[in-house]
Image: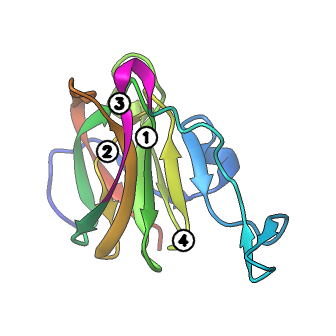
Amino acid sequence: MQACEATGVLLAQPLTAAAFSPYGTVIVAPANGGTLINEGTAERFELLADLKLTHDGGRPVLSVSRASARSFPFTLREMERHALGSQSFVPLGARRLVVVVAAAGSAPGTDDLRAFITDGEQGVCLSPGTWHHGLLAVDAGDYVVLERRASAVDCDIHTLDRPRLLMLPG
């Protein structure tokens, strides 16, 4: 285990739609219930009707982040938020990530953090204002990022009151 001045341990929990709902939406293709398109050769699932990316002159930007795998345990020191738009992370291929979040509103304390680990097939869409850590890839690779861009940067950074050690299950 890495040495640090962290107080307490935050254990990442498996990502579920119900547990993550206060912070955003889990992105995963349902088993069925979509609309057949392309002469019945594809099934379309409309997962999110409004990504909230155009507030105050914003525009949607789709990018790919090529992430290195992080080492765990990992010391959490800061969080960020995007007050004016959502931010989505979706793996290209079977890649896991850890999403560390805290409720929208005032800057979080270390004890306000929650952590979720994806199963490699899930992505997330963070609601506007949700505090979160930057991309924490368990598996190196490419992740699609959909977020809001505008002339003014929409990113608040907050240093935690004390570091916290993030651990993975198992």
Q: Which residues are magenta?
A: 54-63
107 up-or-down from 87: above or below = above
Which one is in front in this view, the residue at disc 2 or the one at disc 3?
3
Q: Secondary structure at mark 2?
A: loop
47 up-or-down from 143: above or below = above
Decide which of tag 2 and tag 4 comes sooner along the chain.
4
Quarter where residue 80 is shown: top left
**Residue 85 on image: x %, y %:** 42, 31
Which one is in front in this view, the residue at disc 3 or the one at disc 4?
3
Residue labelled with disc 1: 101
Decide which of tag 4 and tag 1 comes sooner along the chain.
1
Residue labelled with disc 4: 119
In three-dimensional space, the C-alpha distance between marks 2 and 3, rounded to whole angstroms, equals 11 Å
Looking at the picture, which amino acid does disc 2 mark? His
27 falls in the magenta region: no
- On residue 133, the disc is 2
In three-dimensional space, the C-alpha distance between marks 4 and 1, rounded to whole angstroms, equals 17 Å
Looking at the picture, which amino acid does disc 3 mark? His
- Sort mark 2 into few (<14), some (14-19) or many (20+) by Cα contacts within 10 Å: many
Residue labelled with disc 3: 82
Residue drawn at 43 percent across, 68 percent down:
91
Q: Check if mark 2's residue and mark 4's residue have beta carbons within 8 Å.
A: no
